[in-house]
């Protein structure tokens, strides 16, 4: 599990961990049943306080993405499979919202953004593979 913490970010560290684990689950790079690092292991690898790592895992467990098994570790939960599609769409929707807000700040209309996206897709600028 490759996570990176941005110490200069205004986003709390535990939220950065949660967001990155969510993205890994949503993308399928972390599968249901896969074991995650222990709280101590995560804290050591990211050079963060163990309480911060524990808070991130509690948040993920509350959301049903991970399960803690006493004496065995932390695992990606079975709920992760149905979560994947919905979470990918939620993440994409958040990106679109940011794009539209930035376009509005630049004085562009939503139709301008739509045209640009269509041009990029038609011009081969979109990544190959499945979208959505």
Image (cartoon, rainbow, N blue to C red):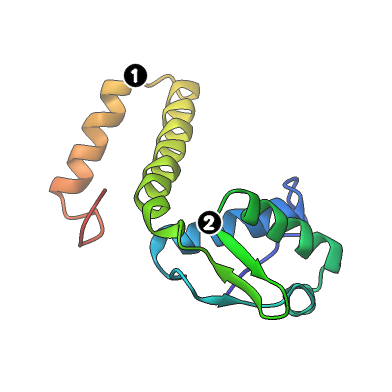
- Left or right: 115, with 4 as reference point: left
**Kind of element beneath mark 1:** loop
Which of the labelled discs sits on residue 109, or is there none?
1
Q: Nearer the viewer, residue 20 or 6?
A: 20
Is residue 24 shown above or below 82?
below
Q: Is residue 115 visible?
A: yes
Q: Which residue occupies the foreground of this view, 2 or 73?
A: 73
Residue 53 at what x, y percent from top left? Answer: 76, 64
Give the vertical position of 97 relative to 8 (above or below). Answer: above
Toward the front, the furthest residue is: 70
Q: Choose the circle earlier in sequence order: 1 or 2.
A: 2
Instruction: Residue at the far left: name it.
Output: 122
Binning the other alpha carbons within 10 Å of mark 2 as few (below 14), some (14 to 19) or many (20 upward) gives many
The residue that appears at 40% across and 37% down in the rendered structure is: 93
Report crowding for label 1: few under 14, some 14 to 19, many 20 or more residues within 10 A (C-alpha).
few
SS class, disc 2: helix
Q: Can residue 1 be seen in this view?
A: no
* Left or right, residue 51 beside residue 34: right
Left or right? Give the position of 90 relative to 4: left
Which mark is drawn over residue 55?
Answer: none
Residue 37 versus residue 59 in the image, above or below? below
Mark 1 vs mark 2: give the one in front: 2
Percent from the top left, x then y, of residue 15? 69, 51
- Name the mark on residue 22: 2
- The image quarter containing residue 17 is bottom right
């Amino acid at each position: 599990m490759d996570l990176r913490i941005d110490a200069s970010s205004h986003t709390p560290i535990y939220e950065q961990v949660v967001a990155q684990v969510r993205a890994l689950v949503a993308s399928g790079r972390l599968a249901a049943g896969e074991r995650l690092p222990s709280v101590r292991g995560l804290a050591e690898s990211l050079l963060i306080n163990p309480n911060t790592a524990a808070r991130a895992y509690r948040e993920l467990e509350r959301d049903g993405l991970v399960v803690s098994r006493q004496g065995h570790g932390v695992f990606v939960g079975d709920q992760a499979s149905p979560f994947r599609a919905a979470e990918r769409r939620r993440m994409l929707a958040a990106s679109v919202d940011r794009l539209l807000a930035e376009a509005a700040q630049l004085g562009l209309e939503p139709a301008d953004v739509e045209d640009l996206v269509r041009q990029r897709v038609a011009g081969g600028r979109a990544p190959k593979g499945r979208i959505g």
